[in-house]
Amino acid sequence: MSHDAKKTALSELLGERVFILNGKQLKNDVLKVLIDSVAEVDGMIQREDLEWGVLHRESIMSTGIGNGIAVPHVRSENIGHACMALAIVPDGVTDYQAPDMKPVQLVFLIAAGGTQRAKHLKILSSIGTLFYDGRLKAAFLASSDPKNCLEILTRAEA
């Protein structure tokens, strides 16, 4: 498989940071799992700064985008390179305040450098494009294995 340098592969940005959280979840609990995993990435800002950035952004406006998807995100001058984490919550995050009022089932946390605005927008666009019709989301929700979800995503991006 050839890699186009301009293409932003979500599967590469996720690495091994895919979590399946069973049972109904609360937004802050899900965000904590994702923040903890991203904070361990080399070149990442301090965990407290990462958490503050994500929660501050959420306090301004919910990052629930509808169709059961949320995309909390943070950009900071001190982040070395973009990365992501994903929580798959089959029973839903009931307190996410998405615009369509539906429980959120996929939460993509994006952390990017302050100068990586274009890359940040490409990541958001890729999520929107890949998950727009609901088929990929349904495949993720049907899987109980994070590695399988990554394989599904890798195939969808090819």
Image (spheres, rainbow, N blue to C red):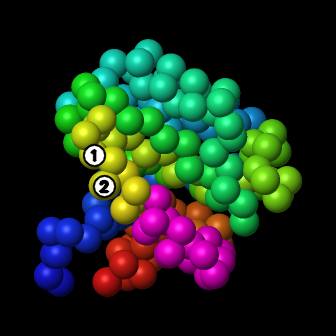
- Circle 2 crowding by C-alpha within 10 Å: few under 14, some 14–19, many from 20: some
Q: What amino acid type is highlighted by mark number 1?
A: Gln
Answer left or right for 148 relative to 8.
right
The residue depicted at 62 percent of the width and 38 percent of the height is 30
Q: Residue furthest right?
A: 101
Most common secondary structure along the magenta stretch: helix
Q: Position of residue 31 (x, y in %)?
A: 58, 35
Circle 1 SS class: loop
Along the line of sight, the residue nearer the viewer: 126 or 17: 126
Q: Position of residue 12 (x, y in %)?
A: 28, 60
Q: Position of residue 9 (x, y in %)?
A: 31, 67
Residue 116 shows which numbered tag? Answer: 1
Rendered position, 1 above or below 64: below
Q: Residue 53: tell me if it is visible.
A: yes
The residue depicted at 45 percent of the width and 66 percent of the height is 125
- Decide whether residue 90 is among the magenta residues: no
The residue depicted at 45 percent of the width and 29 percent of the height is 36
Q: Residue 38: tell me if it is visible.
A: no
Please name the residue that numbered disc 2 is placed on.
119
Quarter where residue 141 is shown: bottom right
- Circle 1 crowding by C-alpha within 10 Å: few under 14, some 14–19, many from 20: some
Q: Which residues are magenta?
A: 124-138
- Decide whether residue 126 is among the magenta residues: yes
* Tag count: 2
- Circles 1 and 2: CB atoms closer than 8 Å: yes
The residue depicted at 82 percent of the width and 58 percent of the height is 100
Q: What amino acid type is highlighted by mark number 2?
A: Lys
The image quadrant where one finds the C terminus is bottom left
Q: Disc 1 versus disc 2: distance between alpha carbons? A: 5 Å
Q: Position of residue 95 (x, y in %)?
A: 81, 39
Rendered position, 95 above or below 52: below
